[in-house]
Image (cartoon, helix red, strand yellow):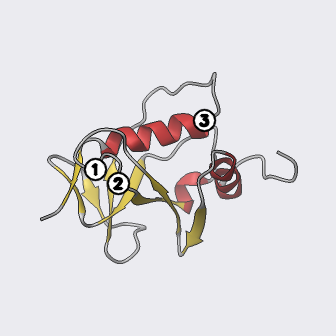
C-alpha cells in the first residue's frame, strides 16, 4: 500500500479503505459502519468508532474499546464514556489472540461484527 503509514491511525484508515470500509476522523475517534451477520442487528448497518489514542500501534496492537452510539446496548457490558463523542458509549471487548495469517483489519472487522451479534437497539 504505497504511501500509507506503517502503523497508527492513518494505517487503520488505509486498512479500512482497502477492506472496502469508508471511515472518517471525527474529534478523537475514527468512525465507520459495519453490518453484523447475526443477532438482533443482523443486516443493519451500525455506526461504530474507535479512539485514535488506541490506534497508535495499529496493526501490531489492536484496540480494546469499541465505541457505539448509546442506542446500541448489550445485556452485560463494561462501559464508560471516556474518549467518546457525545451520545456514544465505549464497551470493553478484548479481541484475544488474533489471526496473523490474514490482514489484521479483516480479523478486526470480524471481531466488531461478532461483538454486535450480542447487541440490540435500545427501546
Kindly state the secondary structure of the residue where label 2 is placed: loop
Query: Badge 3 is on which residue?
Result: 104
82 or 38, which is in the foreground? 38
Image position, residue 20 (x, y; %): 63, 49
Label 2 environment density (alpha carbons within 10 Å; few <14, some 14–19, many ≥20): few
For residue 96, side relative to residue 59 (left or right) = left
Answer with mark 3 or mark 1, whichever residue precedes in sequence.
1
Q: Is residue 88 above or below residue 45?
A: below
Query: Badge 1 is on which residue?
Result: 41
The residue at 46%/37% (across/down) is 110
Image quarter of residue 69: bottom left
The residue at 78%/52% (across/down) is 5
Nearest to viewer (mark 3 / mark 2): 2
Kindly state the secondary structure of the residue where label 3 is placed: helix
The residue at 53%/34% (across/down) is 107
Dots 3 and 2: beta carbons under 8 Å? Answer: no
Query: Badge 2 is on which residue?
Result: 44
Dots 1 and 2: beta carbons under 8 Å? Answer: yes
Between the C-alphas of marks 3 and 1, the distance is: 24 Å
Amino acid at each position: 500500500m504505497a504511501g500509507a503509514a506503517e502503523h497508527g491511525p492513518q494505517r487503520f484508515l488505509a486498512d479500512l479503505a482497502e477492506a472496502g470500509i469508508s471511515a472518517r476522523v471525527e474529534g478523537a475517534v475514527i468512525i465507520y459502519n459495519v453490518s453484523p451477520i447475526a443477532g438482533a442487528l443482523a443486516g443493519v448497518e451500525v455506526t461504530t468508532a474507535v479512539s485514535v489514542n488506541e490506534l497508535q500501534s495499529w496493526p501490531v496492537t489492536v484496540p480494546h474499546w469499541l465505541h457505539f452510539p448509546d442506542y446500541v446496548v448489550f445485556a452485560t457490558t463494561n462501559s464508560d464514556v471516556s474518549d467518546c463523542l457525545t451520545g456514544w458509549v465505549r464497551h470493553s471487548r478484548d479481541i484475544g489472540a488474533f489471526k496473523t495469517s490474514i490482514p489484521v483489519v479483516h480479523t478486526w472487522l470480524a471481531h466488531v461484527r461478532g461483538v454486535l451479534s450480542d447487541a440490540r437497539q435500545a427501546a
